Image (cartoon, coloured by chain):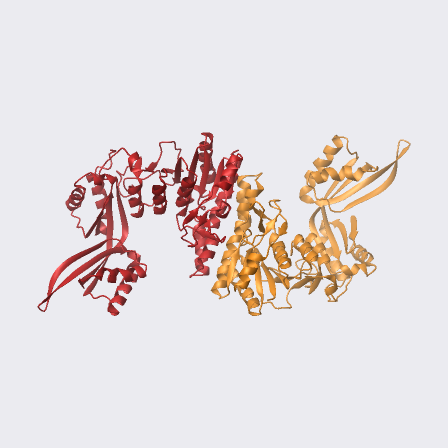
Chain colours: A orange, B red
Amino acid sequence: MPLLVMKFGGTSVANLDRIRNAAAKVKREVERGYDVIVIVSAMSGKTNELVNWVEQTSPLYDAREYDAVVASGENVTAGLMALTLQEMDVPARSWQGWQVPILTTSAHAAARFKDIPRDNIDRKFAEGMKVAVVAGFQGVTDEGRITTLGRGGSDTTAVAFAAAFAAERCDIYTDVDGVYTTDPRICEKARRLDRISFEEMLELASLGAKVLQTRSVELAMRYKVKLRVLTSFEDTDETSGTLVCDEEDIMESKAVSGVAYSRDEAKMTLVTVEDRPGIAAAIFGPLAEAGVNVDMIVQNISEKDYGGRPTAVTDMTFSLPTNQVARAQKALEDARAAGAISYEDLVVDTAVAKVSVVGIGMRSHAGVAATMFKALAAEGINIKVITTSEIKISVLIDRKYMELAVQALHDAFELEKAA
Amino acid sequence: MPLLVMKFGGTSVANLDRIRNAAAKVKREVERGYDVIVIVSAMSGKTNELVNWVEQTSPLYDAREYDAVVASGENVTAGLMALTLQEMDVPARSWQGWQVPILTTSAHAAARFKDIPRDNIDRKFAEGMKVAVVAGFQGVTDEGRITTLGRGGSDTTAVAFAAAFAAERCDIYTDVDGVYTTDPRICEKARRLDRISFEEMLELASLGAKVLQTRSVELAMRYKVKLRVLTSFEDTDETSGTLVCDEEDIMESKAVSGVAYSRDEAKMTLVTVEDRPGIAAAIFGPLAEAGVNVDMIVQNISEKDYGGRPTAVTDMTFSLPTNQVARAQKALEDARAAGAISYEDLVVDTAVAKVSVVGIGMRSHAGVAATMFKALAAEGINIKVITTSEIKISVLIDRKYMELAVQALHDAFELEKAA
């Protein structure tokens, strides 16, 4: 029997009506001949309520108890979804993480899958069950304690089940109807993509397009799980939404597939750092220990003359999330006070944004960077930092130009047109 | 290490403040040298919310899924209680039913305990854990499906753990400060009892004093668990509340310990039923099949003359909950239509109440019934039905006299005075 995994996020199961609506979509797939594994999130708002209770109770909480409390939201939805399907005459039952069992590491609140044995669920399918409704976001350790995967983990649960059960496809139902060339709220010409490669989706997910959790895309890429993103709020069919798939399954070959942005960026520059071997480690080691997520890094070497002794010095610039600036400043000042690093000045700019163009076609299309820089220059937008990867070019610019930059790049690469 | 079981009901853990208040009581017992097993209910209102969702989703729900959904409320409280204790530097962890495991029958929504193996919890106590916080009301079948014990089941969980772990005592913290001679809202002279026997408590619990779940009292009696009922909203010590204990641990020996009442009673009389062997079975069999809980039964044999043929006929009267009258009527009319029984008339009185006096002292004190009937007669209250057991006398009266009857009996047996 061919098998589908269908995942419904919190807004798609926010109340009993929406659960019924989701169940109707599941029933249709059963009628088409599929066995289905449904992964559900908690009803929207429930996980936040539970997290708030835990944080109010114990600011430095025991992550094992956090997991025991927070995982309960998904259990409620799983049971209600199974009951709804039964009401529609679809043989279904719910599975909590420990019942499958979904075995994970014991890294509570950020656990990773170790194994998903198929035996229990396969036996029920063999007995006539058509739908297994599995609580997303959770698992269990070898010692029998409940774990969670970190926020948004239900996407990852869905992909892991699709891999374990060799599903034909993993459909992620959400409140948007697919992956767009850019954010439609910023650029009205944004176009839904029919297909996108795992690599591109990964760049878009980590760049701030909040459609899919990054880990779920990584997992899908590793296990070649066909992943589809589509809306639970409209009627959909086989051609709906966006298919995230292997590069070779994509016919179009535009240079750029999408424009991503990240608004809450800051830029820090250490001015006149002594340039010696190990200086990067001396700077970024303390930042990593302080939990600062450094993103882009640029180093400009220059020769300055200090009282007749020419010394190799450098300016070191990096970007980070705005809300980590204070922590980063303290870490660097502590390192300077301890004599581990030296610098003349620490310049902070908290009004920047990152804009990126992403596309596997970049590998074979020359001149993408030139097109990007020309488009920004034509709008008078100054580029502060540039980084590139094989399929992505990112720039840091003044935040006030962010929307303009996204629109200009969307136009420049003609993303409103299909390939 | 001596061990205590402490149970906190829904109102005692209704929010984070109350959970902290309950945890402080637990901490005090730990400081006195006890290992503690804490049984928690769901935060008040939560179980009702979950039950409503299930019933709206599926009126004839699959009880296995009902249990999976409804048990989740206790899991949240258990985790939050463990975190609160940890914040107070008390080594604690939460246990869900399947983690202990609390093994039950597979009678979903009304499961019964099969076994509570001590190994897992004992091992943690040996490792230094001082408090095991266990989710009440739930268990797990041998097949690994979640069960619940029926409403109020957390009391029963507490007693079962007290029995399994040979606890010194089982303290039930609730929103009243003990068991009273009668309902203080009806009779202002009502007095809190220091001690009451299991047998009396059982009669009071099943007669409508909603302090303890009947099954928990039965279990405590069977396993000789010392059960204490006390309030979680005041400071309490070793002498607080009411101890429910073995008869021989009670020094006082009044004839009557308490007056109980039940407001929503109805009385049905089958007039002129043919009196033949098997007639009671012919009447009450169909009622039982219809799920009617018949309580008191009275049969008056009379001789009537039908056209010269004297026949033994009888009037059969019984009491039942008001909300089951329609169902009972239908069952009896169906039985008459099928020729299984015959009667001239079916008289229904839905405005009656039951008032009972309860006391193990009745066994050794003569004249309790006479005192009761005289007290009611002095108030002009007509008795419609009487039933008695070894330690209880119950009467059915017009509902409008119920409060008056409770007060008159409380006075007549001088319950305001300690023995």
Q: Observer-nearest residue: B325 or A94?
A: A94
* Outermost left residue: B308
The residue shown at (28%, 64%) is B331
A406 sits left or right of B367 in the view: right
Residue A108's x, y, as percent? 60, 44
B242 sits left or right of B116 in the view: left
The residue shown at (66%, 52%) is A215
The answer to whether residue A11 is seen in the rendering is no
* Placement of the N terminus of chain A among the 4 image quadrants: bottom right
Residue A53's x, y, as percent? 52, 44
The residue shown at (27%, 67%) is B334
Q: Observer-nearest residue: B287 or B395?
A: B287
The residue shown at (69%, 65%) is A194
Q: Observer-nearest residue: A164 or B182?
A: A164
Residue B191, quarter of picture: top left
Q: Observer-nearest residue: B354 or A280?
A: B354
Say if B351 sits above or below B132 in the image. Answer: below
